[in-house]
Amino acid sequence: MYADRVLSGMRPTGRMHIGHYHGALKNWVKLQEEYECLYFAADWHALTTHFDASEIISESVWTMFVDWLAAGIKPTRATIFIQSRVPEHAELALLLGMIAPVGWLERVPTYKDQQQKLVDRDLSNFGFLGYPVMMSADILIYRANMVPVGEDQVSHIEVTRELARRFNHIYGREAGFEEKAKAAVKKLGSKKARRYEALRTAFQEQGDEAALEAAKVLLNETQNLALGDRERLFGYLAGSRRVILPEPQPLLTATPKVPGLDGQKMSKSYGNAILLREDPAEVTKKIRTMQTDPARVRRSDKGDPNRCPVWPLHQIYSDQATRDWVVAGCTTAGIGCLECKQPVIDAIIREQAPIHERAQRYLDDPQLVRNIVADGCERARKLAEETMREVREAMGLDYT
Ligand code: TRP
Ligand code: SF4
């Protein structure tokens, strides 16, 4: 809302696989060409479930960054950093915790789901309950408006939006708001001020959402506004409070579900993953031995692609002609499974060739990654500090 800014994070819990690539990284790479992007390793979030196995985090974090860079994240376009190296995230999480109703957190669907699913982990912790609060802090501290995430994270973004609204409602109050807002409108200059007023009226009197959006664009395009005035002008559009923490939107992209080698969800811990930087020989071996339609025991048995985990891979990697060939060949026993798998093997190896190539310089010189991330942490920290100054001031914590 302040200026288009994308933020997303990943928990460092192991090597990246092609599920991460198609589900997130490919999209991150695309977004960096269009927007200011911040991507981080959510090491504190990893601790909520792995507090007793923190060595996994430290082992994973640097290889995860190599994987990101290999996938095409450009340090010149995107800021990549580590959550715990920007301790302001924790300060904001603590402060948001003061206004986060426990009931909201207990009702987040992932809270109970994960407790039921991850039975081998102790999830009855304050930290795990607070997962969405910490995630809210991650997002709000950069005033990011777009958060690319998977479906499973949308409920967390919803909490983020509600916490931002609640924060602005409680702490965006100020004496003489109306007068200050009107004075800020004047500072826009007469032409812009008239347009702002017209759009605001259209929204407030007719509920015209497009006018609201247009007014936000107008404010974003206005460079020389003091931060306080900016917050007032955003807030004045819809209410009588400053907008200190703007509400973000989840950015859901149609991403294909990548099945694992056994047809289950791909996950390193299930041992069914094809890594993002897999050795070509290993790709071949894994796909050749992966499960197929269980009804197709012998070469002469007819199969059904819809019951075969290789089929979704064809949907990701193969063109229409190849897919037609698969359906025809499988259902008539015209082709064998190894024959059917070969185009997928070829496509994965082809896709990974430039990834291996890009990874090489970072593997040869690990210090390069350290430096990129150190720069990223520094840049992120500057942005975070700026928001925290505002937050402390709004909450009255800047007293002397
Ligand atoms: N919870 C996210 C996941 O598991 C990771 C994450 C942490 C995140 N903080 C974030 C994603 C902030 C987006 C924005 O995938
Ligand atoms: Fe699966 Fe292809 Fe074998 Fe059919 S021919 S069962 S789609 S691998």
Image (cartoon, helix red, strand yellow):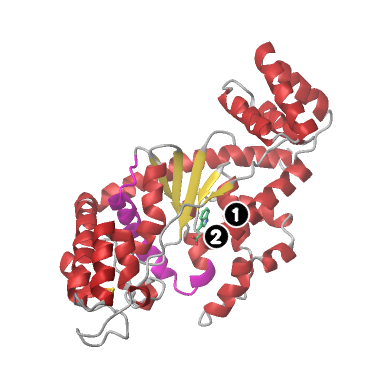
Assess whether residue 371 is covered by the magenta stretch.
no
Q: Seen in the image, is 33 located left or right of residue 383?
A: left
Please, what is the three-letter code of the amino acid marked with disc 1?
Ile
The quarter of the picture where the N terminus appears is top right
CB within 8 Å, label 2 to label 1? yes
Q: Seen in the image, is 62 located left or right of residue 196?
A: left
Q: Which residue lies under the disc numbered 1?
A: 157
Please, what is the three-letter code of the amino acid marked with disc 2?
Gln
Q: Which residue lies under the disc numbered 2?
A: 153
The residue located at (72%, 16%) in the rendering is 186
Residue 61 appears anywhere in the view: no
Disc sitting over residue 383 in the figure: none
Q: Seen in the image, is 350 located left or right of residue 226?
A: left
Highlighted magenta segment, given as a residue range:
48-75
Say if 16 sits above or below 91 in the image.
Answer: below
Main SS, magenta residues: helix
Disc 1 under 8 Å from ligand 1? The reply is yes
Disc 2 under 8 Å from ligand 1? The reply is yes
Classify mark 1: helix, strand or loop. Answer: helix
Residue 294 position, x and y percent, is 32, 85
